[in-house]
Image (cartoon, rainbow, N blue to C red):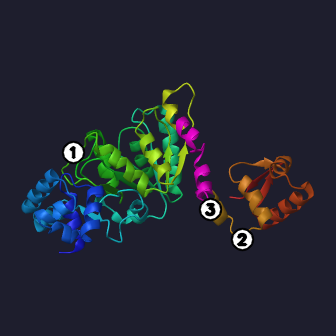
Amino acid sequence: MEERDYYLGFSLVSGIGPKTLGSLLKHFKTAKKAWNASLKELRDAGLGELTTQKFLKSKSEFNFAEFKRKLKLQKIDYITIVDKEYPPLLKQIPNPPILLFIKGNKLLLRSSQILAIVGTRKMTNYGAEVTEKFAFELASAGFTIVSGMALGVDGQAHSATLEARGKTIAVLGNGVDLPFPASNQNLYHRILEKRGAIISEFPPGEPPNKGTFPSRNRIIAGISQGVLVTEGAEDSGSLITANLGLEYGRKVFAVPGPITSSLSAAPLKLIEKGAKLVVSPDDILKEFRIQSPELRISEQKFKGLTKEELKIAQILENESLSFDEIVRKLGSKSSQIATTLSIMEIKGILKNSGGNYLLSS
C-alpha cells in the first residue's frame, strides 16, 4: 500500500485527529510505520491508553480494499495532505485536515482564486440581495466561491454562483454523501451537476454535530484567499470563519448593513477588528487587483480605439449624453473632446441624435 492509504486509515479512527497524527508522524516519521506500530511503541510515542486501544481495535477491523471499493461506488474521492492535489493554502493552517473526502470536481481545490462567502442562516431580504450580488459578480470575475451549504447566506452564495455559471465548493460538517440540511438537497445535487465540489474531512455516513461545524469553518477559511461576511448577528457562526480568516492572514471583508438590524452586528464587529468595509464587488476585485468583467468586456468590444475614444465609448455604453454632459463626466478640455467626437463620428463609432451622442449599433 502507498503512504497515502495509511492517512486514509488514520482519518477514520475515533480520537485521532490532525494534532494527534502530527505527533505520531513526528515520532515515527511515516504514517505507515505509525499504523504498523506495536502497543508498546504507541505508548512510547505518547498515545493515550484509551486512544491506543481504540486505534488497535479499529485497525484490526479495517479493510482498506473494501473501504476504497465503497468510496468508488459512491463516486467519492479523497485527497490526503501528502498529495500534490491538496490545497496549498489549507496546508499552511494549524493542524490541517488529514485528508478531504470529495464528491464532484476535485480540480476546483487547486483554483488560483478562491473566496469564501458566509453569513447568517436567518437571512433578511437585504442580506439575500447583497449576497446574490456579490456572489454572482465575483463568480463572473473568475472567483471560485466557497461556503458551507447551510440555510440562508451560504445557500444563497452557492445558488448565485451557479446562476452566474461560476465554480463553487461546498464544505460540509458531515459526510459528503449526506446532503445537509435536508432542505438544501436540491442545491447539493445542482452543485454536483454543474461541476462543483462537495468536500469534508469527515468520513461518508458521519452525521453533523455541534463539534463538526467549527472544524468545517476552519476549512472554509483555510482554502480561501479571502472571506466575505454579508450579514450576521453578534453570535453568528460566520464570525468564527471570519476570525479564523484574520488569524490565518487572509483578506477579510464585511458588508455594512442597516444600523437598525441585529444582523448587521457581525459585519460591524469585523470592521472594528480590521476587516475591510466593502459596498460593491468591485471593492473586492480591486483588493485582489482583478479587473471587473464589465470593464474587460468593454475593452474587448472597443478594441482598437485610442485611449480618449475608449473613455468616451465607455460612458456612452449604457446611455446617450449631450456634449456638455460628456465634458462634465470626463473633465477634459471641451476642444479636445469635440475633436475626438468628430473623429468617432467619421469612423462610425457613434452618432449625434437630437444633440445627444450615442454609440452606433
The kind of secondary structure element at disc 3 is helix
Q: Please state the horizontal and vertical placement of residue 70, each as a whole percent of the image.
A: 14, 61
In space, the residues marked 1 and 3 are separated at their CA atoms by 44 Å
Q: Which disc, if any, is residue 207?
A: 1
Tag 1 secondary structure: loop
Name the outermost residue toward the top. 260
Q: Give the residue drawn at x 15%, y 67%.
A: 37
- Name the residue beneath numbered marker 2: 304
Query: Please, what secondary structure does the residue beneath circle 2 have?
Result: loop
Residue, far bottom: 1
The range drawn in magenta is 268-294
- Would residue 172 be found to the left or right of residue 116 on screen? left
Q: Amino acid at mark 2?
A: Gly
Query: What crowding class fits label 3: few (fewer than 14 Cα within 10 Å), some (14-19), or many (20 or more)?
Result: few
Q: Is residue 318 visible?
A: yes
- Check contact, mark 1 vs mark 3: CB within 8 A: no
Farthest residue, direction front: 44
